[in-house]
Amino acid sequence: ALGFEQQLDDLSKAVRGDRQTSLFSATFPVRLQRAAERWLSPGRVLIRVAALDLGSGGALAEAAKASEASADAGNAAEDSASRAAGSVTVNPLVAQTLHVCAEHKKPRKLIRLVQQVREEEKQRGARQRALVLIFCNKIKTLQFLVGLLERQWLPCASLHSAMPQSGREKALADFKAGRTPTLAATDVAARGLHIKHVRYVVNYDFPSNLEQYCHRIGRTGRDGEPGTAFSFFTRKLLPLAPDLVALLERSGSAVDPNLRSLVAAAGDAGAASRAAASDSESGDEEA
């Protein structure tokens, strides 16, 4: 959702009509496009940099999430559709690596990943440890991961909405300074924060839509520095898979063969379902 849409509408009405307005966004979902119609002049120029149009894959995942989060089914459907049919852009400086894995295997994979990063630093004799930003969808998961990493002697700070402002500021300060080079965060850190020298972003929990995925991995690869994004993808996120494959291919990233298999299996299942429905309709007509 556009958190300040109403405020921007009010400002737009209050400012003189012959103003110059510029809008910049890493993603451009339908709801933002509609807002842009109101905020920008009819003669506006649209510049899209290596953008990928999303298909219906994101709609299915967002519809499922919205139906759980909202009792208003009409608003939920509109919101999910508006997020699904937009466009996204990935910074070419961000190398994307995605692994399809079972949910119960993610903790061990995360430990190995962070341990590998720290071990490579020791072997290189690096003077500063790389900043690793780990994204979780829920605070409960975040708290579990912090304890898990610290039991492996891998210090990790927390950043989430339930923390007091002073706690958030301290966590960010320690992370930026490298005192605690690993930070586990919810989506409060996905947008609006500019942290220099973030080398790795890890999507421990994959987000529910590709717009948010692009915002998250956009925390690295900034100021001309290369970055790497690691993501764990589970089978329950199958509706996102087709658009995700297209996004990875467009950005020149390797695609996990297991992800391609998921897309193929989903296509076969859909074809079989449509064929069965067609046969059923034919039988009804004959009867």
Image (cartoon, grey):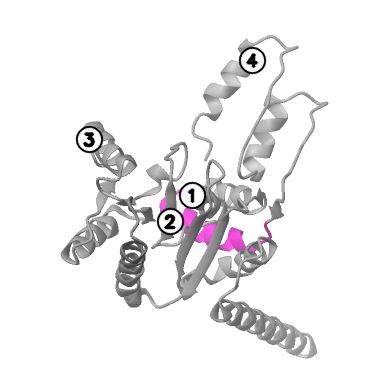
Q: CA distance from mark 3 to mark 4?
A: 35 Å
User: Which x, y percent locates residue 12?
Assistant: 63, 18
Q: Secondary structure at mark 1?
A: loop
Q: What residue span does the magenta drawing correspond to? A: 54-73
Q: CA distance from mark 2 to mark 1?
A: 6 Å
Point out the frontmost of discs 3 and 2.
Answer: 2
- Residue tagged 3: 164
Q: Which is in the foreground here, disc 3 or disc 4?
A: 3
Q: In the figure, is residue 134 to the left or right of 280?
A: left
Calculate the distance from the C-alpha at mark 1 to the C-alpha at mark 3. Answer: 26 Å
Residues 114 and 35: in front is 114
> Marks 1 and 2: in contact by CB < 8 Å?
yes
Numbered label attached to residue 200: 2
Q: Which residue is mark 4?
A: 13
Q: Are marks 3 and 2 in contact (CB under 8 Å)?
A: no
Residue topped by disc 1: 220
Inter-mark Cα distance, 3 to 2: 26 Å
The image quarter containing residue 104 is bottom left
Q: Amino acid at mark 4?
A: Lys
Residue that protrudes farthest toward the front in the picture: 125
